[in-house]
């Protein structure tokens, strides 16, 4: 019985769509490549949405297609945007210019072009991971990636996220709103000063909660409990914003179905 | 030696050079810093090939062994192969193969993006709206003081970030402006959320700095695995 | 057991698909009826708008578009608004992407906004698409000191030296503003960490609502303004409408975020209803269990 209801509903939807296409109220899937594309995109959208009811073969088809297409997309982008101009173009500029990017012909060969043999070698080593044996050589490439990431992050986090934040906290209690334009006058207000003081107390209390070298008892315990509340406010705000973001994405898909596919908007 | 010492040396050398270049921004350190960063960018592009290769190896095996659900793996392999070919050959690109952007409007690669990648990616993320609503209903319960604070703040933010927030408390006189939902939402975001996230940020920064240092000087070797 | 308690119990264990249906119906209905509400710009959003307004004609603005279709409905309205304002002000726009899909986002905004609405602007003189490079923060670290070492061509394969607006540019330190649109890593945080803070370049941007609370600590010292999600995009559009009244004439084209705030508001109300109702049901059941003990 349930199956009959579902098939009946599906038939009704197909009939309505066919009538709308026949009446010229919406784009035909057979009109042109774009028309077919919009219908296929709508099919994929509904296929993925169908997961909300239950896992099903149509959803799995869309999911697997997405995985394959996205992996290839990333690979193609990496090839054309970085490997061709920044690796092949540096090592064999005239050949690359002739075959792929004529624009590269206008520049002289880098005198230190041979240095680019290093990323080429590391790149090949990285790909040895795909081989059944000898995959351990890929660790050399991994070591390079890790060394670079660690070196870059150590400085960036130390300056921007540690020193920058501590410095901003220390000077913020002045109650002063800096000018937007260079040379412009800033603004002082007691209200701003009050909220800045609240913020500093809140920061210190939240930091005290993360300080585990001292037992959270007595006055320190009460202060760190205040820190928990500050963190709860932070997580609450994060949750509120997360809901906002997710809904916006849904609105975008609904607009696509209603406007681009069904032409009812 | 090949398995552990050389990788450790590479990490230590590259990491140290990048740190030194910050304090001594002169040749050869600044040039090495630039070169290493560019090499990193290139290797990152090779990682995409590795990712694609791994995917195909996995799904290809499933297809060749006729494992359960191999038809779906075939869909992945065909989708991957098709997009790879049309992307690498810039098929259908209105400006031709050379001297044109691979993502140029009208190319088959662009069509694959517009009508396959885009709807799939956007809908996958849009589904989260439903799950976040369901999670709000099931898990968002005022069980204790902390949970109640979280709930109250989320409520103020959700209402305060829409027109309803302003409308609900519009009747308050100007002297009680500080009780309006938009004012409360603003102060939650710019004072308390700001403070909480700053504390978290300082903590994370210290964590990342120490982890990076451990990786550079070879104390943290987990990336080398056990072999 | 009273009928009311039975109802509360049933509601407490409601199948999640009913919640899905309610949210879906709320969003679809609000989208069809095109509800819109007025927006009052917040200081963080106004700071970005004012900064762009005060830049002299010909100032260089770096526009990194680090997002993909997964967050496009949320971020595309702000990307469009940024580009429109830069075009109106006669600023030089340098598009760049750290996400592979970001390049398609750049192409989209060039086709949708610049080619259709500002056909007088010339590629290579008023705007340039430098395209995508892999490496995330590694890319930022390089272009902070030497842009042309990494960007030897633009996204279309044209030699960087042959592009007029690239003349005299050694790195991004000379840029007047970094205006990022970000959906995660790498994104606005990395632009602040690796370019804005060390290079002392004014940095601002829009990001997904999920990211926004995490970026507040950078304001105002390291980030002059922040736009979090569709709500902030709607506020920016309200400012654009105020500054450039012609944008009010075609809401569907110029004010997409404002039109999306209608369904957004209705969905928020639906979710708030479920949170409140869920809590009421929970408290009733808890008290009942307490009384039974």
Image: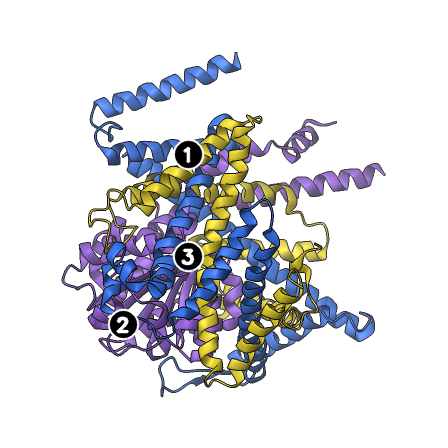
- The answer for how far apart the CA atoms under marks 1 and 3 are is 24 Å
Q: Is residue A135 left or right of residue B103?
A: right
Residue topped by disc 2: A108
Residue topped by disc 1: B78
Asked if C284 appears above or below C164 in the picture, the reply is above
Percent across and percent down for residue B151 are 62, 53
Q: Quadrant of residue A139?
A: bottom right
Q: Residue lying farthest right? A: C293
Task: Say whether mark 3 and mark 1 are on the same chain.
Answer: no
Q: Residue at x 47, y 82 (%)?
A: B28
Q: Nearer the viewer, mark 3 or mark 2?
A: 2
Chain that is yellow in the image: B
Q: Residue at x 60, y 43 (%)?
A: B135
In-front residue for pair A173/B211: B211
Q: Nearer the viewer, mark 1 or mark 3?
A: 1
Q: Which mark is residue A156?
A: none
Residue topped by disc 3: C99
- The answer for how far apart the CA atoms under marks 1 and 2 are is 41 Å
Local crowd at mark 2 within 10 Å, few (<14), some, or many (≥20)? few
Percent across and percent down for residue A149 are 55, 67
Asked if A120 appears above or below A63 in the picture, the reply is below
Local crowd at mark 1 within 10 Å, few (<14), some, or many (≥20)? some
**What chain does mark 1 sit on?**
B
Chain A: colour as depicted? blue
Chain that is purple in the image: C
Q: How many marks?
A: 3
In-front residue for pair A17/C133: C133
């Amino acid at each position: 019985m349930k199956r009959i209801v579902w098939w009946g509903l599906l038939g009704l939807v197909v009939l309505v769509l066919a009538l709308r296409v026949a009446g010229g109220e919406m784009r035909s899937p057979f009109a042109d490549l774009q028309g077919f594309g919009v219908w296929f995109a709508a099919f994929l959208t509904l296929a993925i949405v169908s997961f909300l009811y239950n896992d099903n073969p149509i959803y799995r088809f869309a999911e697997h297609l997405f995985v394959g297409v996205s992996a290839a997309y990333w690979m193609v982008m990496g090839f054309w945007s970085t490997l061709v101009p920044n690796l092949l173009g540096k090592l064999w500029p005239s050949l690359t210019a002739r075959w792929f990017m004529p624009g590269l012909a206008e520049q002289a060969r880098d005198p230190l072009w041979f240095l680019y043999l290093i990323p080429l070698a590391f790149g090949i080593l990285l790909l040895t991971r795909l081989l059944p044996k000898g995959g351990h050589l890929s660790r050399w490439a991994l070591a390079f990636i890790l060394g670079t990431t660690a070196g870059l992050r150590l400085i960036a986090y130390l300056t921007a996220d540690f020193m920058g934040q501590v410095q901003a906290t220390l000077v913020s209690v002045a109650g002063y709103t800096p000018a937007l334009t260079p040379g412009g006058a800033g603004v002082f207000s007691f209200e701003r000063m009050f909220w800045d003081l609240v913020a500093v107390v809140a920061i210190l209390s939240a930091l005290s909660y993360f300080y585990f070298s001292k037992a959270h008892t007595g006055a320190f315990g009460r202060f760190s409990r205040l820190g928990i509340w500050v963190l709860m406010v932070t997580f609450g705000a994060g949750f509120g914003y997360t809901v906002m973001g997710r809904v916006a994405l849904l609105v975008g898909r609904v607009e696509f179905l209603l406007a681009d596919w069904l032409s009812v908007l | 030696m090949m398995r552990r010492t050389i990788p450790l040396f590479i990490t230590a050398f590259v990491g140290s050079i990048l740190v030194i270049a910050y304090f001594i921004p002169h040749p050869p350190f600044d040039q090495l810093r630039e070169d290493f960063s560019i090499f990193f960018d290139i290797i990152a592009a090779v990682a995409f090939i590795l990712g694609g290769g791994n995917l195909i190896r996995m799904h290809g095996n499933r297809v060749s062994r006729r494992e359960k659900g191999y038809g779906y793996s075939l869909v992945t392999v065909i989708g991957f192969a098709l997009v790879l070919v049309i992307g690498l050959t810039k098929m259908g690109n209105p400006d031709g193969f050379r001297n044109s952007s691979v993502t140029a409007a009208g190319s088959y690669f662009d069509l694959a993006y517009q009508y396959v990648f885009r709807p799939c990616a956007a809908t996958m993320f849009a589904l989260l709206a439903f799950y976040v609503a369901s999670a709000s209903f099931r898990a968002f319960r005022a069980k204790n003081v902390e949970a109640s604070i979280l709930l109250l703040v989320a409520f103020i933010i959700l209402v305060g970030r829409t027109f309803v927030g302003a409308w609900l408390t519009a009747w308050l006189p100007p002297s009680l402006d500080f009780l309006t939902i938009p004012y409360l939402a603003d102060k939650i975001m710019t004072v308390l959320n700001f403070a909480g996230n700053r504390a978290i940020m300082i903590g994370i920064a210290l964590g990342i700095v120490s982890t990076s240092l451990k990786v550079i000087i070879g104390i943290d070797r987990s990336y080398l695995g056990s072999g | 057991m009273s009928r009311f308690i039975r109802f509360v119990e049933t509601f407490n264990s409601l199948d999640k698909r009913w919640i899905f249906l309610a949210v879906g119906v709320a969003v679809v209905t609000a989208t069809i009826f095109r509800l819109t509400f007025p927006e009052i710009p917040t200081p963080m959003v106004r700071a970005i708008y004012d900064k762009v307004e005060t830049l002299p004609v010909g100032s260089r603005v770096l526009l990194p578009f680090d997002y993909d279709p997964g967050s496009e409905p949320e971020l595309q309205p702000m990307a469009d608004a940024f580009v429109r304002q830069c075009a109106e002000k006669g600023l030089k726009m340098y598009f760049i992407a750290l996400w592979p899909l970001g390049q398609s986002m750049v192409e989209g905004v060039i086709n949708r906004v610049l080619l259709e609405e500002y056909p007088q602007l010339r590629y290579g003189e008023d705007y340039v698409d430098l395209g995508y490079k892999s490496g995330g923060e590694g890319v930022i670290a390089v272009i902070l000191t030497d842009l042309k070492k990494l960007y030897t061509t633009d996204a279309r394969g044209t030699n960087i030296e042959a592009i007029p607006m690239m003349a005299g540019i050694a790195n991004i330190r000379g840029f007047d503003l970094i205006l990022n649109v970000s959906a995660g890593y790498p994104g606005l945080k990395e632009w602040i960490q690796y370019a804005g803070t060390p290079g002392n370049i004014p940095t601002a941007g829009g990001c997904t609502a999920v990211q926004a609370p995490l970026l507040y600590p950078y304001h105002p010292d390291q980030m002059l303004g922040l736009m979090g999600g569709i709500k902030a995009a709607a506020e920016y559009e309200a400012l654009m409408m105020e500054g450039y009244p012609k944008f009010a004439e075609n809401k569907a084209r110029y004010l997409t975020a404002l039109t999306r705030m209608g369904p957004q508001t209705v969905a928020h109300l639906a979710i708030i209803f479920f949170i409140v109702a869920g809590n009421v049901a929970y408290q009733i059941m808890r008290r009942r269990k307490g009384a039974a003990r």
